[in-house]
Image (cartoon, grey):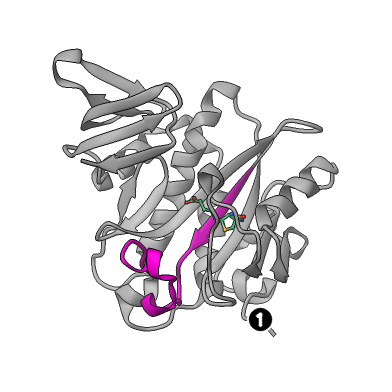
Amino acid sequence: MSDLTYESVSAALSESVKEKFTTEHFLHLEETGSTNDDLLNRIRSGTAKHLDLIVADLQYQGRGRRGDRWEASSGRNLLFSIALKLEEPKETWCRLPHLAACVLGSSVESVLTGEVQLQAKWPNDLLHEEKKLAGILVETVLVPEPFAVVGIGLNVNMRADEFPDELREIATTIYELERCESSRSFLLGEIVSGFASGYPNMLTNFSEVLDWLEARSVLSGRRIEVVTTEGIVHGIGHGLGNDGELIVDQGDSGLKSILSAERVLFR
Ligand code: BTN
């Protein structure tokens, strides 16, 4: 039996979070194509509830941003998707990926020993010493009701030598930071608790999210190349705008505000 049961995930949750996140909100699958796809389908069928969560031990079609694949060995990491009802004004929805990075990163930092601070790479990657620790894929459904699916891949107990060659130098795991295994169920409980208490209020009180991200930004002050659908932007990372957009200092050409990008590279 998997270590990921409702009882183990909810064991350390406060009573107020347990009222919002009950056993009916939780589904564990030994394997699936993609937890994002499963939750998107549930939302489209009109049967989803706010904070519904699907977690899998193994995904065979795990999806990343830009159509990349998301790889993880069975039962080692956290691969899950959580449904958030979109009830705030539409103009605030673009803040959600940043809110998700802040909630996830704060939860992870709270379980790490010592004073470890993660790094945030716009738009919503979490890194440690410039190696990727977690990725977030946010997708929205408008009909029958507006919902967002926040899909999270968090590298927990995989060892560096289990990554395929092309990822070994650019990815890391909590095991590699801590040199011991972490409880996936406790971690998942912390993250659920972060969403249950932080969403949607942090969408409107967004300065808390911006402050958290700015303090950890790996792009600020660095020479970067941002590949967007409208072209390539070169400059120095200059922090975040009010909605979490990336500001790039292009020197004589001034500041450029970027809402979304295909890729951000250090130059
Ligand atoms: C990225 O950094 O490209 C985002 C990766 C998101 C991966 C997670 S794993 C759980 C959920 N289901 C998916 O198919 N993708 C997300």
Whether the residue carrying mark 1 lies under 8 Å from ligand 1 is answered with no
Residue 54: x percent and y percent? 69, 60
In this picture, residue 242 sits left or right of residue 34: left
Q: Which segment did they paint magenta?
A: 149-172
Q: Nearer the viewer, residue 130 or 78?
A: 130
Residue 109: x percent and y percent? 35, 62
- Name the image quarter holding residue 73: bottom right
Question: If the picture is divided into quarters, which one holds ligand 1?
Answer: bottom right
Q: Mark 1, residues whose alpha carbon is within 10 Å: few (<14), some, or many (≥20)?
A: few
Residue at the spot 50% in from the left edge and 54% down from the top edge: 194
Mark 1 lies on a secondary structure that is loop
- Name the image quarter holding residue 167: bottom left
Residue 51 visible at all:
yes
User: Which quadrant, please, contains the N terminus?
Assistant: bottom right
Q: Is residue 264 above or below residue 132?
A: above
Residue 18: x percent and y percent? 65, 61
Does 21 appear in magenta? Answer: no
Does 158 appear in magenta? Answer: yes
In this picture, residue 1 sits left or right of residue 17: right
Q: Is residue 22 above or below residue 82?
A: below
Residue at the spot 40% in from the left edge and 40% down from the top edge: 123
What amino acid does circle 1 point to? Ser
Q: Nearer the viewer, residue 198 or 247?
A: 247
Residue at the spot 25% in from the left edge and 41% down from the top edge: 219
Q: Is residue 246 above or below residue 24?
A: above
Badge 1 is on which residue?
2
Q: How many marks?
A: 1
